Amino acid sequence: MADKTIQISIPADEDGYVSFECPHCEQRFKLRADEFEESDAINLFCPICGLVHELDHFYSKVFIEKAMNLVEQEAMEMIYDMFKGIERKSRGNKFMKFKAKSKPRVDIKEIYENIDELVEVESNCCKKHIKVTELDRLIGVYCSCCGVKNWNE
């Protein structure tokens, strides 16, 4: 059986922001999708706690769960297709009959997750746009690009 690649994209909200979750403080925030896509950064600074980690560690648990759900659906379809192939090959065999049952379905969950209570902040240093809670905005956030603390007075 050949390897199969599944591409899953993180959908943006109505304002063009994508959700992330810090692996350190587990707080959720959003980055503007166009700025995120054009960035070639390997690491990301959490705007809330300021700690840095590899970019792929910031995918939210909800997104990972929903992505795994899509992968499970694809795997079930591949297994079903394999069994249908065995069924077709066994049609002319009088010693063995094989019947694939109906195609299994896995409930596909919506990947989009909205966090309505977030407010937009622009970092003073790199001019990156971030959405955080109002409390985090008042305390001050870190730039997701360079990690500099941005105080909003």
Image (cartoon, helix red, strand yellow):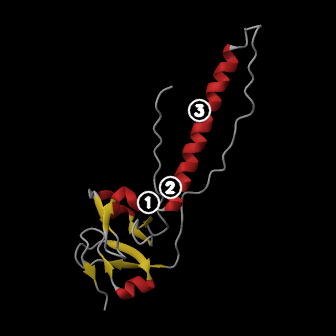
Asked whether 129 or 148 is in front, the reply is 148
Q: Quadrant of residue 47?
A: bottom left
Q: Is residue 38 left or right of residue 103?
A: left
**Image quadrant in which the C terminus is located:** bottom left
Q: Which residue is found at the position 47% from the left and 34% from the top?
A: 4
Asked whether disc 1 touches disc 2, contact meaning CB atoms under 8 Å apart, the reply is yes
Label 3, label 2: how far apart the Cα atoms are: 21 Å
> Which one is earlier in the sequence, the residue at label 3 or at label 2?
2
Percent of width and height locating residue 6: 48, 41
Q: Quick check: 95 left or right of 45?
A: right
Q: Amino acid at mark 2?
A: Ile
For mark 3, give the secondary structure. Answer: helix
Q: Residues within 10 Å of mark 1 (few under 14, many from 20)?
A: some
User: Which residue of the protein is positioned furthest toward the bottom in this rendering?
Assistant: 153
Q: Amino acid at mark 1?
A: Tyr
Q: Residues within 10 Å of mark 3 (few under 14, many from 20)?
A: some
Q: Secondary structure at mark 2?
A: helix
- SS at mark 1 in the image: loop
Residue identified by numbered label 1: 59
- Answer with the quarter of the image where residue 27 lies: bottom left
Q: Up-down: is 14 above or below 142?
A: above
Q: Amino acid at mark 3?
A: Met
Q: What residue is shown with label 2?
A: 64
The residue lying at 60 percent from left, 43 percent from top is 73
